[in-house]
Amino acid sequence: MRASRAAVALSSILVLGGCRSTLDAAKKLPEPSPAVADLVDYRQGLTLLREGRVDEAIQQLGSARAAYPRSAEVANALGLAYLYRKDHRNATKLFAEALALDENLVEAKNNRGVAAMEAGRFEDAEKDFSEVLAGTRTSEHVKARFNLGLLRARQLRWADAERELTTVLADDPGYLNAARERGLARMKLEDFRGALEDFLLFLREDGNDPVANYNAALCLLTTDRRDLAVRYMERTVQAAPESDEARKARRFLGGEPGAAGRER
């Protein structure tokens, strides 16, 4: 009964992964193929994008596109830059252009699905992800499956989201972002033990992730492991003090005897 009451309370404060997660399968930037490896603007644009200098990357990749308007890879990379800027309209247009130039550039179809999902066009997103999964198996398959899991979460289809993300981990146990997102889905399904296992698995790779730390703390609260939950709340604040998760963790710590003092 106590765990059930905790589940009701936690359902209102569960922190979802948000934009970072939906861009996950798109954020591994392509390596230049032999056809474009000598394009200086293209390579520099990818470097800038890896560094998070999105506006500069758009300028550089725009120059590459002007010089090589028939390159599908350049159009796809420029689309990624616009996706990072959250300009979904231009991103979608560029991914479509890339596919028109090279229908076999599967990553552009995956990326177009991400842009559609971010823009709230769920049917379009599902169509792209499903077409990738139905095609010849490539490295993009696991990304498409991960994105389909995120789409199910956006649709509040938590059991379906968990199933898709479990398939990702079965295909690629090292795809730990799928564990993080499966943990969020499991929390919605009130499987707090399974969710905690997922968050702890992810935190072995990225110990500073605020979403995983905060939600691990929430899972621990359902089993009365309050002292350990406090530690994860404190880690949330220390790792990402400006995040929404840290704000909620500080609110919790402020009401926890002794915890507020440790935070200060």
Image (cartoon, rainbow, N blue to C red):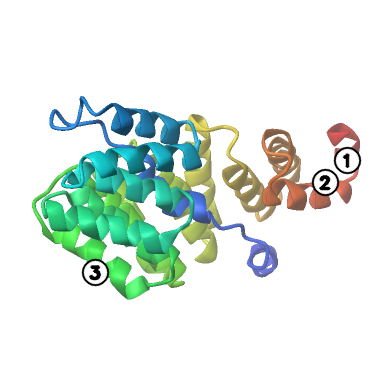
| Mark 2 vs mark 1, CA separation in Å | 5 Å
Determine whether, in the image, residue 58 is placed left or right of residue 207. left
Q: Earlier in the sequence, mark 1 or mark 3?
A: 3
Which residue is tagged 1?
A: 260
Q: Is residue 194 visible?
A: no
Measure how far apart labels 1 and 3 are at the Cα level. Answer: 49 Å
Could you tell me the amino acid type at mark 1? Ala
* Amino acid type for the residue under numbered disc 3: Lys
Residue type at numbered disc 2: Leu
Q: Give me the residue at 87% from left, 48% from top.
A: 254
Q: Residue at x 38, y 36 (%)?
A: 60
**10 Å neighbourhood of mark 2: few (<14), some, or many (≥20)?**
many
Residue plotted at (63% across, 67% down): 11
Q: How many marks?
A: 3
Residue 62 falls in image quadrant: top left
Do we see residue 153 in this rendering? yes
Tag 3 secondary structure: helix
Q: Is residue 78 above or below residue 13?
A: above
Disc ID at residue 253: 2
Task: From the viewer's side, name the closer residue of 177 and 29.
Answer: 29
Residue linked to disc 3: 127
Tag 1: Cα neighbours inside 10 Å, few (<14), some, or many (≥20)? some
Q: Assess whether mark 1 and mark 2 are in contact (beta carbons under 8 angstroms).
A: yes
Task: Give the residue at the far front of this rendering.
Answer: 67
In the rendered structure, which disc, 2 or 3, sits on the residue that comes first in sequence? 3
Q: Position of residue 214 (x, y in %)?
A: 65, 47
Residue located at (45% from left, 67% from top): 154
Determine whether, in the image, residue 205 is placed left or right of residue 108: right
Q: CA distance from mark 2 to mark 3?
A: 44 Å
Q: Quadrant of the N terminus?
A: bottom right
